[in-house]
Image (cartoon, rainbow, N blue to C red):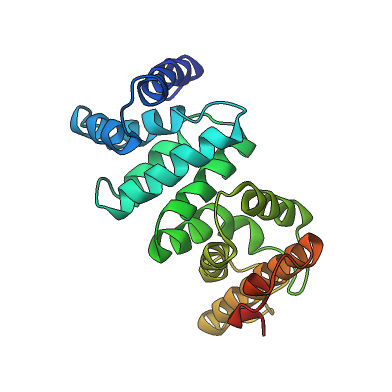
Amino acid sequence: MHNTAGAHTRWVIGQELWKMFEDGGYALEDIFGQVVAHNSISWMQGSLIGAMAATDDASRQITVGHALGQFITDGGMSFGDAYAGLNLTGLSGEQYDMLILSVAGGSGPAVQVAIGEQRFGSVLAWIPAGGVDQGAVDLFDNAVAAGALTVPQLVAVLVGVGMAQYPGPYAVQTSIGAPAREGRAMMGAFRAAMQALREMRKGRGRQGRGDDEDPLFI
């Protein structure tokens, strides 16, 4: 399967691909296009691209993520293929989260919602309605501060979190009515996600009227 040795090999290739961009003057989108054109294994395409971000330098994860988000939006590869490959790259949690949130920052609403639902929904959907996961707040806060994505783009990610269909014990009443139960779970998750964003915004302070007057928070 996808063992450590295989991941290391992909990292080496990924670093060489990054050098093509950094030293060789190739655009990241052109490099991604070559990866897709010369590799018929869909998950390997995303994994090799993800390996370009295998570093503790968050700015590289942001650069690769933004370019990959745009590449997906332009039809260069599907989000499903990219997401499957990124999951198999072997990045650390911090590296992966910064990369995937940067993909959200470089793409459109559909991908942003999908990232929220698939990456973060299974975690945040279990937060008590009205509660806050401080780790998630810090993650999103750091990503916005680093320029991985904007607050409006983060809102789209959080909408995806709210759409995740994971009934949590705090959002679900004991009942055999599955549709109503799932609806309550979804709304509970969405309220928790939005509360996390509100707490994050309070922590950052007011940096200008533009973001603070987002109509979703009036």
**79 relative position to 114: left or right:** left
Count the labels in the image: 0
Q: Quadrant of the N terminus?
A: top left
**144 relative position to 22: left or right:** right
Residue at screen point 43% across, 25% down: 2
* Residue 40 locus on image (x, y percent): 20, 32
Residue at screen point 45% across, 27% down: 51
| Residue toward you, 86 or 203 | 203
* Residue 19 locus on image (x, y percent): 41, 19
* Residue 87 locus on image (x, y percent): 47, 38
Q: Is residue 1 visible?
A: no
* Residue 183 locus on image (x, y percent): 55, 80
**56 relative position to 115: left or right:** right
Seen in the picture, residue 75 relative to 206 is either above or below; the reply is above
Occupied quadrant, residue 33 = top left
Occupied quadrant, residue 81 = top left
Residue at screen point 55% across, 76% down: 182
Residue at screen point 58% across, 44% down: 97
Q: Quadrant of the C terminus?
A: bottom right
Q: Is residue 104 visible?
A: yes
| Residue toward you, 185 or 179 | 185
Seen in the picture, residue 18 relative to 32 is either above or below; the reply is above
Occupied quadrant, residue 24 = top left
